[in-house]
Image (cartoon, rainbow, N blue to C red):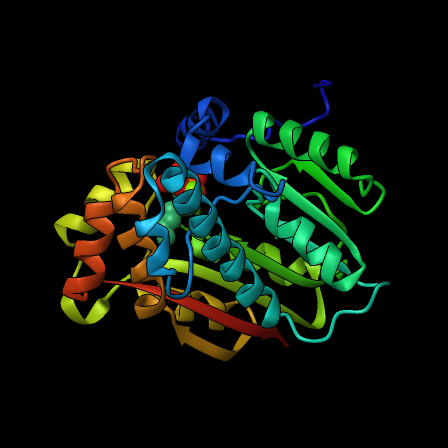
Amino acid sequence: MTALEKPVTRTAYQQSVADYWNAEKDPVNLRLGDVDGLYHHHYGLGDYDPAVLETPADRRDEAIIAEMHRLETAQADVLLDHLGPIKPEDRLLDAGCGRGGTSVMAHLRFGCQVDGISISEQQVGFANAHVRQRGIDGSVRYHLKNMLDTGFGSGTFQGIWNNESTMYVDLNELFAEHARQLKPGGRYVTITGCYNDVTGGRSRAVSQIDQHYICNIHARGDYFKAMAANGFVPINVVDLTAATIPYWELREKSSVATGVEKPFLTAYREGSFHYLLIAADRV
Ligand code: GPP
Ligand code: MG
């Protein structure tokens, strides 16, 4: 870092999040990513094939992992389905890109340039090494950047998404920065977990999820307030809660369960928490 460069993490909180992800080498993410080289940091959507649970013992673990990975890839496809028409000359931003899976899928689907950003050096290094191996490093680039102040030019991107990364930041600051970087008429998509304003504040299960990841899950209503305040007009809101429960049920039975499965299943089943997709246009 030169004297003129600003540090990527600005607060002790952000540094603790960066430390968590710099140290993270969890099989629930690495073994799934090893299936086909798409490394995800999000959950799954859709029904699992119950046959995987009946697989002979010597191949059962492998079959469950491949099935969980298929559901996580399906989730990223649902997110990308909501970006609207994207041309090869457009640019996309993956805010909170993790090890980069969704960015790779976006490039393969749309043929355009994708920038992924993370405050974890480990994730950025891993993701860049991976796109070099795939030979797509001229089109997909990962950067050590703070999503609240990226340094990208104004009006750069046709589409921006947060795939399960908004719970680490203040939503007003986030949407102000996204509004700046998106072209007018550009599309924003998030898939997120949010707590239910109707049932009150954070339930115990929601607090347990926050503690597990050092995040601050927002209320559902906070998304719409912060979007409206920053020039975003929602075009699609999809409650994905019922569609993600099977993933968690399978994950709970898998060898790579981390302990966070119970709080997720409790929160979803009691209705204190939703898995939500929001797509919005920047006006
Ligand atoms: C999953 O990442 C997402 C987060 C950590 C953000 C929190 C998401 C919510 C919906 C509350 P991951 O794939 O690294 O998690 P895990 O290691 O548990 O699979
Ligand atoms: Mg994961």
Residue 192 in the figure: left or right of residue 125: left
State whether residue 217 appears in this view. Answer: no
Image quarter for ligand 1? top left
Q: Is residue 248 visible?
A: yes
Query: In the image, what residue occupies the spot 77% across and 51% down?
Result: 153
Relative placement, left or right, of 201 versus 130 is: left
Q: Is residue 274 left or right of residue 42?
A: left
Task: Judge by depth and name the residue closer to the eye, 263 or 74.
Answer: 74
Q: Position of residue 191 (x, y in %)?
A: 46, 61
Q: State the quadrant of the N terminus.
A: top right
Q: Nearer the viewer, residue 10 or 53?
A: 53
Q: Compared to 84, does 7 lie above or below?
A: above
User: Which residue extends farthest front?
Assistant: 56
Examine the rendered structure and indicate whether residue 137 appears above or below residue 185: above
Residue, x 45% and y 32% (percent of image)? 14
x and y, in percent, of residue 86 in the image: 75, 69
Q: How many marks?
A: 0
